[in-house]
Each structure stands twice: as C-alpha cells, then as structure tokens.
Image (tube, grey):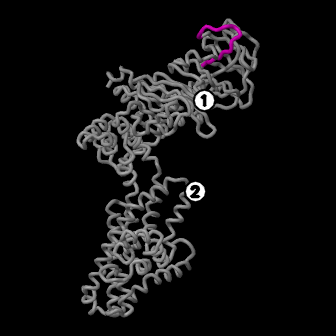
Amino acid sequence: MSGPRWLIAPAVVGLALIVLPLVALIAKLDWTSVPAAIVSPEAVSALSLSLVTAAAATVVCIVLGVPLALLIARTTSRAAGVLRAVVTLPLVLPPLVGGIALLFLLGRTGLVGASLDAVGIRIPFTTGAVVIAQSFVAMPFLVIAVEGAFRTAGVRYEQVAATLGASRWTTFRRVTLPLVGPSLVAGIVLCFARALGEFGATALFAGNQQGVTRTMPLAIYTSFNGGGVGQDTAIALSLLLVVVAVLVLLAMRSWREDVGL
Amino acid sequence: MSASAEDSDSSLVVDVLARRGAFALEVALQAAAGHVLAVLGPNGAGKSTLLDIVVGRLRPERGGVHIGVRVLSDARSGIHIEPEHRRVGLLNQAPSLFPHLTALENVAFGPRAAGASRHDARADATRLLAAVGLLGYEDRRPARLSGGQQQRVALARALAARPDVLLLDEPFSALDVTTAGDMRMLTAETLRDSATTAVIVTHDVVDALSLADDCVVLDAGRVVDGGRIDRVLGMPRSPFVAALAGMNFLAGTFLGGGLLRTDDGRMLRGRESEPLRAGERAFAAFAPSSVGIARDNDGSRVEGESRLDAVVDQWERSVGGVHVRLVGALGADLKPAEFAALGLRRGEPVVLHVPATAVSVYSADGDASATR
C-alpha cells in the first residue's frame, strides 16, 4: 500500500463498518428456524414479488435510461451538467421524499393522478406503483454508468459507421451499444440491486399489502416490527436478500471475466 | 468496375463557400472518375474543413458538392444528403476499427449495413482482406493487430462499402516509415485496380506522387495552385509547394532574356519554362543539388551562371551529403567532402553559384493552369 502507513487504521475501521453488521446479523440467526422462515408463504410471496418488480423496474430503466444517457452524453456540456444533476436527484433524495413526491404526482388527487383517476386508472398501492417507485430510485445508477461510457466512447466510431453507409439505427445497435456493453451490464446490475432493496418510496407510494406490494424489504420491516411472525423471520429474510444481492454481484463478476474485463 | 468509371458518374465536383467559426473555405475542385486527386496544403489551410464538406458533416454556405449527376449538397436548394447516404468513404490517419468486432466483421460491416446477407458480406470481406494481404487474420480483434495491419483492415473496410468516392486523410502519417511505404504502395495498387475515385489530403509529397495524377494546393481556405503534379511541383507557385518539392524558390520581376530581378534586388538568370512578358511578375525555382557554394565573391564571372549572396544558417544530413540551409529559405546540397573543405560556420556570408540551365523561370500567374 502506498501513502502513509497509518492510513491502514481508518481503512480497517471502514471495512469493519461494512462487514461487522452483516456478521452480527448472521450471528443472531437461529439456524433451526431458517428453513421454515424462507419457505413460508409470506417469504415466497415477498421474494417472488421482489424479483418480478425489480426485473420490471430494471427493464423500465434500460428502455428509458439508455436513451437518456445518450442524450446527456451528446448534448452541450452546460446542458449535460444540468441534466446530470437532475438525474442524480433520486440518489441523494431520501427515498421517503421520493415516495411522497410520487404520491403528489400520481395519487388520486395528484398533479397527473387526478386526471388518471377520472378515467378510472389508479396507480398508488398497486404492483405497478412498486415498479414506478423502484424505477425512480434505481434510474440514476443505470444512467450515470452508461452516460460516462457513451461520453468516453465519443462519436468517432459512429462517424466511421456513417461513412460506411450504416443508418443511425444500425450504428446505434451495432456500434454505440456494444461499445458501452460492459458499463451497461454494470449499470443494469446496480440498477437491479437497488430496485431489489427499495423500501422508503415503495412503502409510501405503494403501501404494504401482501402479494401486491409487500416486497422483501417491506416483509422484513413488517416481521421485525412483530407483524405476525417475529424477528427470527425478519433475520432469515434479511439473510435471503443478502444472498440474492451477493449472487447478482457474483454473476456480474463472472460475466466481466468472461468478456475479458 | 472500370466500365462504370468510364461513365464518369463517379467524378467528384466540389464548388463551395463554407465557414467554420472565423475560417472561410472557398474552393472549386474536381476529382475525375476513377482517378486520384491530391489536396496539398499547410496546417490550417482548410483540408479538414474540405473533408467535412464532402463527407457531409458541414453544410456549404454557397455552392454544392456533386458526384456525377448526384447532388450531395446544394446550398441554393437546401439539399443536404446525410453522411450515411452519400456513398463517400473515409480513411483516416487513425484506423478507428470497431474494437468489439474482428477484422473480418469490421470489413463486412459496410456490406451488412447495405443489406447484404451474412454469407455474401463475409465472402466480400474475405476477398478484400486477401487483397490487403491479411488472409489468416480474419478472427483477430483490432487490439491484436499491429498499427500497419489495422490500417490495412481499415482500407479493406472502406472499400468493402463500395463508396463512389473515397477520401483519404493523411492515411499513412501515423505509421512508421517502412510500414507507411508498404501501405502507400498497397493503397495505390488497390485504388488503381478498383478504379476508385479518390481524394487524398496530405502534406507528404510522396503520398501525392504515389497515388495521384492531379493535385490542388490549398492555402488559407483557397486553391492557390493546381494541375498535374509534375507541373505543380516543377513550377511551384508558393513557398509551401516549393518546400514540398524540395526546390529553392524566388519571386520577382521578369526582365526579359531569362533574367529575373528578385524582390530583394538580386539578379538570377534561368530558362523560361513558359512564354513570359518583360515586366511581368514571375517565379524562379532551382534544385539545391544544382547549387555550388563559395566562401568569397572573387568577382569573377562565369557565362550562364548567377551569383547570389547568402548567409549560412544551419545544415543537416541529406541523402548522400549535407543540406546547407541559408537565411531566406534557400538551400544547397553538398557532398560531404565539399562541405568539409569549405568549413562553413553559422552566420557566415557565402556566395551561391547557380547555373542558368538549372533555373526554371515561369509566370507567377498560375490561374490558367490551376483551373483545370
């Protein structure tokens, strides 16, 4: 390690701050109750809802976020600075605030929600609301990762493709996107992981109804507060969520090694 | 392909005024179908602006760009064909191969984009990779090819897209001397064999000599000279072209009888390369190898030889000798023994002996030959 030797001390403390809570979580675990807890209908329902909604939110983020990232990367530096700050907002905003904001936009009396309500569309407290809340908080992870890669790749290869007669769509599909492939995958993984752990915005905007909006984080919160089962279940479910998150990260690692990054 | 070249439907005609910031480019030039035109010019002359006009990245303010009867840009009617629909290829100084594609996939990119089947595109690409001597490298990614190999793939890729006109922008300047030589020969042969209409932008006279028949000289956004390369280099009309041609260059007034009075008042005798009127503005050019250097002006006169006073600036190695640079952009090539015998010092006054038979005197008014 370069730099002053004493830097090792804060580094170790920093690592401990991340690792020790997880160690404590596992230490507290009553292993005999784990199997029952994770195959309970509540757990299975929460996990499958989480996976489905997080996957849906990730798709939303890809479809909307990649074009947004390209727009930011190709606009003037002044406009890019403003757009980047706006896109980063959900990252620095408390998710609870995001949930309230979504309610004011799409709630029954909200800015847009009132008109939707008039034609019979109600978004809050549905599974759709979960996906919207997750997309709101996860979008910055994808946009920031991909935007940087678009900017680094520049327009050089796109201009070459044009002189070879490739249409803009062909160029985007066969040149622009593959060039940012590794960053896109990293962005997707971070986006999915963030959507999976989303709690605050979901709780306010989508509620906590089992099978409809009670994702893993909400199930953990519910059981921790003694809603029916108890803290052991909460701990077991937490462990399950940690395992899923670690698996996602490992999958990305092995993919990156596959393509030689 | 040569048949279609004869139809002259792939001749490139550029006649534009274009602006980029404070810089204005106003040029008219033509590359004949199946032929290569060299565009020579110092840095900042407007070469890259010209390329952007032809590629379609910049709209002309006046005039237009045509390939045969096809309109690529026309300021009056507002027509501006997008780069991807121009059938104008570009080979840059940097190969810019797509890093995520193999050599073969890079070359097949153009045909695939034009709608060729995977099989046909690959067959096309294989044929072109063979033409640039890279059979056996089909599956290599660019990162595993040398700089010269990458530029060969880039050439094959540009030709695979079957452009009507291929633009070459300093295509060999990033390569080492030997590789550049190979690549230059390969490019010349490939362009000749495919009868591709091409424009090469360069400040390397060897590029122009190897690839092109005709050239235009750009300076400060305007065409200052043009025509057959041997004529342009043989009778340079600007210090830039004279330097490219490796010639000594003096401007002055023609006095008649082969005599030129230079702008700084020196007298130079030469051969009239074209008919000249006494009193007309004229240029003189002569090769550094034809010049002798003496240390003192002994006052003697030799029939048919001019004497020019000069001051030694510095010297450098030349092929088989020493090139002595003199103040005022003149030069003399000496054999090493001659140089040693003179024992020149910097700042020393010397006399140049210039045989009249080695000096070409011609009109400064190059318009007559530049407009072809």
What chain letter is assigned to the residue under label 1?
B
Q: Where is mark 1, residue-wise?
A: B219
Q: Which residue is rendered at x = 55% and y = 78% of the image? A: A7
What chain letter is assigned to the residue under label 2?
A
Q: Residue B115: x and y, percent?
A: 29, 41
Q: Residues within 10 Å of mark 2 (few under 14, many from 20)?
A: few
Q: Residue furthest left?
A: B119
Residue B320 visible here:
no
Amino acid residing under circle 1: Asp
Q: Quadrant of the C terminus of chain A?
A: bottom left
Circle 1 — which element? strand
Q: Is residue B334 magenta?
A: no
Q: Which residue is rendered at x = 47% and y = 32% of the image? A: B73
Magenta stretch bounds: B273-286
In the picture shown, does residue B13 fall above or below B258? below
Q: Residue B108: x and y, percent?
A: 31, 42
Front-lying residue, B306 or B265: B265
* Image quadrant where residue B34 sits: top left
Q: How many marks?
A: 2
- Is residue B259 found left or right of A93 in the rendered image? right
Circle 2 — which element? helix
In the picture shown, does residue B50 fall above or below A79? above
Front-lying residue, A184 or B204: A184
Q: Where is mark 2, residue-wise?
A: A78
Q: Residue furthest front?
A: A118
Front-lying residue, B262 or B110: B110
Amino acid residing under circle 2: Arg
- Is residue B242 found left or right of A143 in the rendered image? right
Q: Which residue is rendered at x = 33% and y = 59% of the image? A: A259
